[in-house]
Image: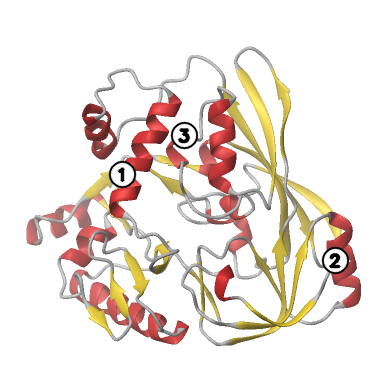
Amino acid sequence: MLIKKNFSLKKLNTFGINVYARYFVEVKNIEDIQKIFEIYPSIPKLFLGDGSNILFLKNYYPGLVMKMGIKGKKVIQENDYKVIVQAFAGENWNEFVKWTIKKGFIGLENLSFIPGTVGAAPIQNIGAYGAEVKDTLFKVQAYETEHQKIREFTREECKLQYRYSFFKHPHYRNKFLILSVFFLLRKKYKKLNTSYVEIQKELENMNIKEPTTHDLSKAIFNIRNRKLPNPKKIGNAGSFFMNPIVSILDFKKLKYRYPAIIGYDISHDKIKLSANSLIKNTEWKKKKIGDVGVYEKQPIILVNYGKASGMDIYYFSEKITKDIKKKFSIPFSREVNIIR
């Protein structure tokens, strides 16, 4: 275990912000984690995956950044119909999803090509194309930093909601370091989720009528490749804003005033609004100020065109959220985690 000082995190956050950490270490096992808390018991700590959902506001982090490097994935239990798999927190999320598809396991294919690590998945309850981690999560293994012990949380205890979990609550943030995640997947007789119109159109373009998990994953790759910017070429953190959830009555009122706004049923009385469609109905569509801009193909994404600072991006996003709230009278929140 090598602890580095004044370490640049530019390549470890997808916005490409050149922020320095006072201390940096990549942990490869539980013993490394225990040693870190023995050596540095009191200084602030930041747990880092692939840096795909964070925005640093300052150019210096005064504490210790711990990059999760514990990797591995395996089958824990299975029968003819179901399987429980374990993936360690440092595993690349998309590589893990591809592994499950190759094994013939069903349940994670709609979450293909989401950037980040396995450890970040339950914290954010990542989701895409009609699926979320909560649909297949079995349990989470975490290191409790205050008492320095390993704990397990069931799916119910994780309190998973739209882009939220128990681990994101302000009181518990950074008090638990995810070690590994267990998923309950199907092996047979599981109808694939192709409910999204974009997926249906892409499968038609691929001339596929009865898709396999591999076909569905490929269709999602095609869609994401067309719509989303590559962070290796343009700095971004994927979806910057969350899709607001409103009542059916509020949606009908908005739809009457702004017919182009899109919403999706999520329960008998709630609608998830498309943040993209909201931004498109404002002056912020394709707008750029300095090196910060709204991505032209996907307004929910903010991009760093070169030398934007974390504060530049943050202030840009603040203006958008305030304008959305003022115009539509609905809450509009950031999905990206802000590191102050």
Residue on which disc 1 sits? 223
Q: In what element is the residue under mark 3? A: helix
Residue flagged by tag 1: what amino acid is it?
Answer: Ile
User: Disc 3 marks which amino acid?
Assistant: Glu
The residue at the point 24 percent across, 78 percent down is: 323
Cα separation, mark 3 vs mark 1, equals: 14 Å
Q: Residue at x 67, y 29 (%)?
A: 84
Q: Point out residue 295 in the picture as x, y percentages from the top left corner.
A: 28, 66
**Residue beneath disc 2:** 1
Q: Is residue 222 above or below residue 161?
A: above
Of mark 1 and mark 2, the one earlier in the sequence is 2
Per the image, label 2 sits on a secondary structure element best described as loop
Q: Which residue is mark 3?
A: 109
* Residue 66 in the image, given as x and y percentages of width and height: 72, 68
Picture quarter containing residue 281?
Answer: bottom left
Q: Quadrant of the C terminus?
A: bottom right
Which of the two residues, 153 or 81, is positioned nearer the viewer here? 81
